[in-house]
Image (cartoon, rainbow, N blue to C red):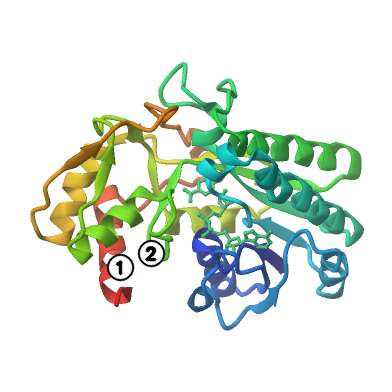
Amino acid sequence: MNIAVTGGAGFIGSHIVDSYIEAGHNVIIIDDMSSGVKTNINPKATFHKIGIGDKKIAQLLQDEKIEILNHHAAQISVRISVDDPKADAQVNILDTLNLYEAARAAKVRRIVFASSGGAIYGEQDYFPADEKHSKRPLSPYGVTKLANEKYLGYYKTVHGIENVIFRYTNVYGPRQNPHGEAGVIAIFALKMLKGEQPIINGEGTQTRDYVYVGDVARANVLALTEAARGIYNVSTGAEYSVNTLFQLLQMKVGKPIKRVHAPAKAGEQKRSVCTSSKMKNLLQWQPEVSFEEGLGRTVDWFKANTK
Ligand SMILES: NC(=O)c1ccc[n+]([C@@H]2O[C@H](COP(=O)([O-])OP(=O)(O)OC[C@H]3O[C@@H](n4cnc5c(N)ncnc54)[C@H](O)[C@@H]3O)[C@@H](O)[C@H]2O)c1
């Protein structure tokens, strides 16, 4: 199949590109390199340095005869979305609509979209959340993810473009950017390896559901199958507190590191965990990489790739 992956030079997108290439597909990457990394780019993919808001995208999708648009490019910082909701919406709504309109013009058959379980459910009523859980986003970033789900519903109903929407929990693994404000595992792993002090926000009892990036890439391969339609949580259903994560990471890094806490960040979610039983029942997907194994692979990668 001819597939375009936006954000294919980023963390999750680059693993998806690798899996698609490995499965024998023809892949183009659309990435403006705002946070993408050159070494993430699979040399067997065709790389286009272009923003998703660029008017030339429609022609590009048409020329490349794109059948599947896998959309992972985004403004990913919750903090930026809170500080500047307009800048967030510029990329995650307006530029994204430029991309969807381009897909419509180019007669793309299916759009796969990276949504967010943690960001759209908000503080949960029950644990783990399934896809029917109420949606009460706590940030403009979460609002844009939910809006994208609705836009894709519109493109399906009115224009017949199929969609597969993955609500990821916290994705982690090799190539995650350790310099942003998101991605606690990458941030802590790098600091621990460099002998710097990681800081835990609040008491460290807040929990998250961490899903390994290789498992996420495998879900995106299943998104190409006929059976895949609509919205799915992509998650593990297991919760780990930041304190437990700290302890497990420290064991993988192999040196004792003291725990230092800072005041809690205002508005930070307390618990977030989602069930992926729909993925299991309908697409036979379940996470294969255990948390300990995934943490080990992540630390090994940072060891090998940090100068
Ligand atoms: N990492 C997570 O835990 C997580 C959880 C839920 C959802 N997501 C979503 O998954 C997607 C990928 O996230 P990631 O963690 O890999 O982030 P990332 O920053 O590593 O990747 C995003 C990529 O998109 C590119 N990009 C950004 N704006 C662009 C634009 N306007 N035009 C073209 N390219 C642009 C960046 O250069 C980067 O390569 C995002 O949509 C994010 O919201 C991530």
**Cβ–Cβ under 8 Å for marks 1 and 2:** yes
Mark 1 lies within 8 Å of ligand 1 (Cβ measured): no
Rounded to the nearest angstrom, the CA distance separating label 1 from label 2 is 7 Å
Q: Residue at x 57, y 70 (%)?
A: 23
Residue 174 shows which numbered tag? 2
Q: Position of residue 50 (x, y in %)?
A: 72, 70
User: Label 1, on which residue?
Assistant: 302
Left or right, residue 296 beside residue 215: left
Q: Quadrant of residue 149?
A: top right
Amino acid type at mark 1: Phe
Q: Which residue is depicted at the point 66% across and 68% down?
A: 32
Quadrant of image for the N terminus: bottom right
Residue 14 percent across, percent down from the top left: 53, 67
Relative vertical location of residue 123 with respect to residue 46 in this rendering, above or below:
above
Question: Image point 55% across, 22% down: which residue?
Answer: 133
- Classify residue 136 by image quadrant: top right
> From the viewer's perspective, is residue 270 above or below residue 200?
above
Residue 8's x, y, as percent? 60, 66
